[in-house]
């Protein structure tokens, strides 16, 4: 029997997020011949986001536009997605394991009386079953789960599932507009203040410069920030640096933080604990800077520099500036 797979295609300020393509990629792994993939886009200005997802292979795009959806409001977005679910009647619902996805998914699971698997890092099809893998105990173990029945709700950890690719052969997606149900909102967002450091989303940056306990202080992150700004990248951190109070936990990369897969990852003063490696080991090129030649980070690094990060990072910045500026 054919299924309908429904994904929430997350956007921000009208632009489609990378996790939306990854969630669509997950749906394509799950889908069998005859199944329908439906992508839901919601917001106050969604034309660009809808256009962005159309070429990636969804069979149908459901769009909802309203001023109440300008910023994420739990009441507004849950009402919006309920309206879409009532019309599409999906068998499987997929979200990114983001702040929004983690909030919406359990509400949707309760509404549909569905089972839920959260924080999925891999999806496989074996003997007619779809198997979902998720980490346990800070990545020291993994469990594999299957659904015995539908409906089912799944959240996908960002930067783990291969994103959907541009499809030149698939038929164009049809777009269905759904009216916003205009629920009574228990809360109203008056203002949204973005952090000054949030120049580039850490999970979507092509270059990430990360600091560990070796940066020694909040001031120690300044050379990293200067290099990141020059390269158009973002600054990250190990849990050790966050625990020490050198930076905000929003920068944490690792098993209990964010997962990144940039083109270039530069680890500065990071020893390389397994929990941190779980969050960055899939980076295309890893460069490690550490005074300890025995630091575990060098085992996964493509290039290693044994030295003081406060000497090496400014030198790198100077050399890059000669080439780029």
Image (cartoon, helix red, strand yellow):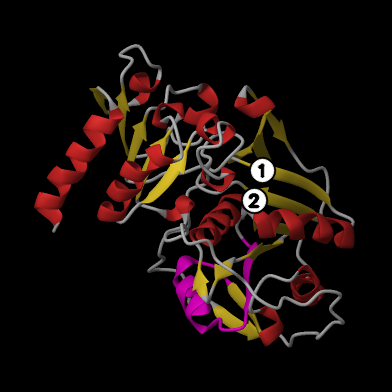
- Tell me the element at label 1: strand
CB under 8 Å between callouts 1 and 2? yes
Q: Position of residue 249 (x, y in %)?
A: 58, 43
Question: Which quadrant holds residue 63?
Answer: bottom right
Q: Which of 127 and 143 is in front in this view?
A: 143
Q: In which quarter of the image is the N terminus?
A: bottom right
Q: Is residue 168 left or right of residue 105?
A: left
Stretch of the chain drawn in magenta: 34-59
Q: Position of residue 119 (x, y in %)?
A: 66, 43
Q: Determine the residue positioned at 67% across, 38% down.
A: 131
Q: Is residue 10 left or right of residue 66?
A: left
- Label 1 sits on residue: 119
- Tell me the element at label 2: loop
Q: Nearer the viewer, residue 145 or 235?
A: 235
Determine whether 259 is above or below 18 in the image.
above
Q: Where is residue 27 in the image (x, y as percent from the top left)?
A: 60, 56
Determine whether 246 is above or below 79 in the image.
above
Q: Is residue 91 left or right of residue 119?
A: right
Q: Where is residue 203 in the image (x, y as percent from the top left)?
A: 48, 51
Determine whether 66 is above or below 103 in the image.
below
Q: Determine the residue positioned at 27% across, 25% down.
A: 308
- How far apart in space, not on screen, are marks 1 and 2 (Cα)? 6 Å
Residue 55 is one of the magenta-drawn residues = yes
Q: Which of 17 and 254 is in front in this view?
A: 254
Tell me if I can see residue 94 in this picture. no
Q: Determine the residue positioned at 43% across, 32% down.
A: 281
Q: How many labels does the image show?
A: 2
- Label 2 sits on residue: 97
């Amino acid at each position: 029997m054919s299924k309908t797979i429904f994904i929430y295609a997350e956007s921000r300020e009208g632009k489609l997020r990378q996790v939306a393509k990854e969630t669509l990629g997950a749906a394509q792994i799950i889908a069998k011949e005859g199944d329908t993939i439906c992508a839901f886009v919601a917001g106050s200005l969604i034309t660009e986001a809808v256009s962005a997802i159309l070429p990636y292979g969804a069979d149908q795009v459901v769009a909802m536009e309203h001023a109440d959806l300008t910023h994420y409001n739990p009441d507004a977005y849950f009402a919006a997605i309920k309206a879409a679910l009532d019309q599409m009647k999906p068998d499987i619902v997929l979200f990114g394991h983001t702040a929004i996805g983690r909030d919406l998914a359990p509400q949707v699971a309760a509404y549909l009386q569905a089972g839920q698997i959260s924080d999925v890092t891999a999806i496989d099809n074996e003997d007619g079953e779809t198997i979902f893998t998720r980490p346990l105990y800070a990545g020291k173990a993994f469990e594999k789960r299957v659904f015995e029945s539908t409906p089912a709700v799944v959240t996908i950890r960002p930067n783990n599932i291969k994103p959907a690719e541009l499809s030149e052969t698939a038929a164009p997606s049809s777009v269905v507009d759904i009216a916003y149900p205009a629920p009574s909102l228990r809360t109203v967002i008056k203002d949204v203040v973005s952090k000054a450091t949030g120049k580039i989303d850490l999970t979507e940056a092509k270059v990430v410069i990360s600091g560990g306990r070796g940066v020694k202080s909040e001031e120690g992150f300044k050379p990293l920030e200067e290099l990141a700004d020059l390269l158009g990248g973002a600054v990250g951190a190990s849990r050790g640096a966050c625990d020490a109070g050198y930076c905000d936990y929003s920068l944490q990369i690792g098993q209990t933080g964010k997962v990144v897969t940039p083109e270039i990852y530069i680890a500065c003063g990071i020893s390389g604990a397994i929990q941190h490696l779980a969050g960055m080991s899939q980076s295309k090129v890893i460069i490690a800077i550490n005074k300890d030649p025995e630091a575990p980070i060098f085992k996964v690094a493509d290039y290693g520099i044994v030295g003081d990060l406060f000497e090496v990072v400014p030198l790198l910045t100077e050399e890059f500036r000669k080439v780029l500026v």
